Image (tube, rainbow, N blue to C red):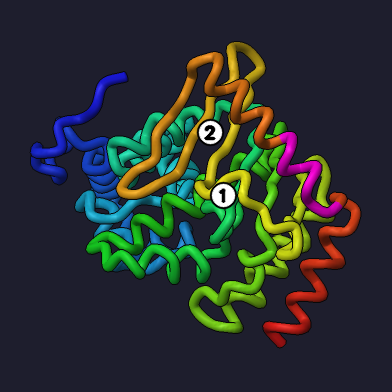
Amino acid sequence: MTVENETAESTDPAVSPLAHFGAEVRLERERLDISRAELGKAACCSYSLVAKIEAGRRVPPLDFAEACDQMFPHSNGRFARLWPLALRWAFPPWFRQYVELEWAATSLRMFHPQLLPGVVQTEAYARAVLQAGRPINLDDLVTARIERQRILEREQPTRLWLVLNEFVLRNTVGSKAVMHGQLSRLRDLARKPPHVVQIMPTGENNHLAASPFGVLSFSEGADVVHVDGFPRGYLLAETDDVAAANDAYDLLKAMATPPSESADMIDSILKDCYT
């Protein structure tokens, strides 16, 4: 997999998919004599966001791309097709391959000891987590993280099996209001097939895995393991590594509470800590 030249001018449509998407929107909008305000109204966003997307300075949500296809005759879904390339540009180069694999996966088994993983975070929780690193492109990072979650809602969703330490539910990120919204979403997810959520009670003293990791499975091909870490995560595809990750995940599932108890446990912590 090739990596784009990160030193290239990000606003040059020739080298940045994000800039290319914005330039195409602007050219089509101006050709049809549609104002930014009109496009913003159709896409349920502000004039300023349209301007930033056209300038290649903001990552467009999928809803924006779909609105462009509806507003611009004869686009034939072009902007929805360009959207994944524009979205990919928001991620750091080392994470882009993982995002592509995540999008193609049929199942995703994840363990997180300290935070909710990005694929289930609310926008407020994601913003609180990401802004801790003081990034200059916070809005793009939040948009990109939330858009990843479409894999759980599409017609053929990626099946998520999530194991969390109980600490994750009690670790206040942002504020009590942020956590109330986040745990409400997690509780609903725990009740929604085909997804599964399990909680590792604090009393279990889980010392098996200190780092977040996930096992991605596909309709064709072998499993791949992603290990999160600082300053960056990494992918593992060697047979022995994948086997070790699968064994570790099986043990984590066995140590955690049954899936049928997860929603009630989440709801109890939500009421005790965040109301």
Q: Which mark is residue 102?
A: 2
Q: Is residue 123 positioned above or below 58 on the image?
A: below
Q: Position of residue 174 (x, y in %)?
A: 49, 77
Give the magenta-colored segment's residue range: 250-257
Q: Which mark is residue 119?
A: 1
Q: Position of residue 194 (x, y in %)?
A: 80, 40
Q: Residues within 10 Å of mark 1 (few under 14, many from 20)?
A: some
Quadrant in the picture for the N terminus:
top left
Look at the numbered discs 1 and 2 and tell me whether their residues touch, using CB distance below 8 Å: yes
- Closer to the chain start, of discs 1 and 2, is 2
Left-right relation of 218 to 184: left
Magenta segment includes 265: no
Q: Position of residue 206 (x, y in %)?
A: 66, 53
Q: Can residue 81 be seen?
A: no
Q: How many marks?
A: 2
Magenta segment includes 251: yes
Left-right relation of 74 to 206: left
